[in-house]
Amino acid sequence: MKRHNGRDAALFLAPTAVTYAVFLYIPIVSCFVIAMSDYDILSPLNFIGFSNFKRLFTYDRTLSTYLTTFKLAGMVVILHTIIGLMMALIVRHFHRRFQSVLRSIYYLPSILTTASVAIAWRYIFHSDLGILNYFLRQLGLSNIPWLLDPQWVYGSIAVFSVWKFVGGAFLYYLIGLETIPESLYEAAKIDGAGSVSTFRHITLPMLTPTIFFVVLNLCIGATQMFDEPFFLTGGGPGDASRTVNLFLYEVAYKEFNFGYASAIAISLFFVLAIFTIVQVKASNKWVTYDRA
Amino acid sequence: MTVLNFSKIRKGALSLLALAIALLTLLPILWIAATSLREPSISMKLPPSFLPKPPFIWENYAQVFKSLPFFLYFRNSFVVAVVATSVQLIFSAMAAFALTRIPWKGKTPVFLVILAAMMVPAQVTIIPLFIVMSKLHLINTLYSLILPATVYPLAVFLLKQFMATIPASYDEAAHIDGAGRGTVFWKIILPMVKPSLTVAGMMHFLFVWNDFFRPLIFINSQTKMTMPLGLHVLQGFMGAGSISIVLAGVLLSIIPPFLIFMVGQKYLMEGMASGGIKG
């Protein structure tokens, strides 16, 4: 029975083909083209070769925003990876019902609108009137200039980011922990292994694929950070917390330098692609994929 | 005996730790709720409150609607999220159908092209889209937010996974009864993948509702703003003095995602998990 397979497949794929082409793949190519120009939306397209790309490596502000982004991302990735794992290890000790209550609470901030809660956190971080410093003073400590000091802003964004997004890493770990066969733990118990050595020799190796996945996801997400600095610090003080994405936004929509902004976007695209490739390659070496 | 005591102590310590983390997680939200009901003039007065204490100033919530077209923001966010999610779900389900239930060559490369879209950062497409939208006079319309949001590769992935588990005998039986592919898709397969549609739908709805970057660039007229952008305006408007009014707005804006989470958290977390399997 002939059923026009090719025609039907084309028909069913047509909406996806059109929307992906128009809203994704053609814009990607256009981004490269615009990056070769000094387009400002008003004057016609004028090509200037690779000078926008050259400027990426010579224009200090771009390099410094990249440095800021990597510093922030590194901090966020380390904190989420460790805290998320600790939370999952704690939660796993409880009965099913209590576990699911804790899971819901821990995951809740992850689904809330980042913009909304970041607006609230700006007040929480307030130096004199914010509740964080209020608690510090109650403990006899002195105020921390959370959003006002170029060093502390990293900590502030990290604190917010952990509160807001650690639920994601936590959930992945919790699922990863569930896939570790109980028999391995029983065998370890029989061998008289303590909890530290069980963690080192069973939990950690069995969890490496999950850790790898979490780190990869966090790297990709954190490198594109936008909402957090936009609402908490506006990139300040000075340029202290200006991420690449925030800088790109300003170059495009405050300076209307679409050519240069596109070059920044392309560079970000490659950085993320390199991240992915490096992580996949590295994972082959240290990830235990066979989960018995 | 000592072992038993030790494990009891450990269990107690773990419970305390677990509750402390839960408290830290909820405290900012409680603070938002409690402060949103305070008199605006003392909204930042210390000590802070974490549980609403009378007098409750419900006027703060009314003030949010009085000072800005807050209801419009709600409506816009809702229209954009519902329309984009519905259209996206149908398109993604059709693609997943073509990728799992019709025999043809080239499925794998097509699927990879769709999946690769997940890696593309929004910043790469936003400038060309902005230029096209402004040439087509779609800037400051909800179309500028809905149209690009019809692309959601994760939904194709989730739906394809699920559809692949449905035995081919369902299609065959329907074909023998004379049903065409459209009927099989609409009447048989689509109802069977409802769980995946729910997961992908909720995840996408949340994504669109929470998105700030696209509205920030495509919308600048008050009447077309979505919730997060409207809150940004409210903050600029009221942030200096009356933070209880700003926080009232914040609380209102997180109610829809919160409700979705309460209703569908089981599905949502499953969706997160299956998104994680792809590694």
Image (cartoon, coloured by chain):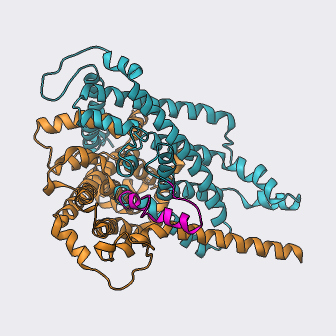
Q: Which residues are magenta?
A: A118-144
Who's the residue at 19% across and 63% down the image? B75
Q: Residue furthest bottom?
A: B54
Residue A119 colored in magenta in the image: yes
Q: In the picture, residue B239 is in which quadrant?
A: bottom left
Residue B44: image x %, image y %? 37, 69
Colour displayed for chain A in the image of the structure: cyan
In the rendered image, which quarter is residue A245 located in? top left
Q: Furthest-top residue in view?
A: A49
- Residue A256 visible in this rendered orientation of the protein: yes
User: Would residue B181 appear left or right of A146 to someone viewing this image?
Assistant: left
Taking the spot 20% from the left edge, 72% from the top edge, the residue there is B63
Q: Is residue B273 visible?
A: no
Residue B204 placed where, x, y %?
35, 55
Residue A233 image position (x, y, % from top left): 38, 48
Q: Toward the viewer: A283 or B43?
A: B43
In-front residue for pair A100/B267: A100
Residue B30 drawn above or below residue A283: below
Where residue A265 sits in the image (x, y, percent)?
35, 31
Indicate left or right for B250 with B224 as reference. right
Chain with orange colouring = B
Residue closer to the observer: B42 or A23: B42
Query: Which residue is found at the position 50% from the left and 29% from the top?
Result: A274
Residue A256 in magenta? no
The N terminus of chain A lies in quadrant: top left
Question: Which is nearer the eye, A253 or B115?
Answer: A253
The picture quadrant where one finds residue A193 is bottom right
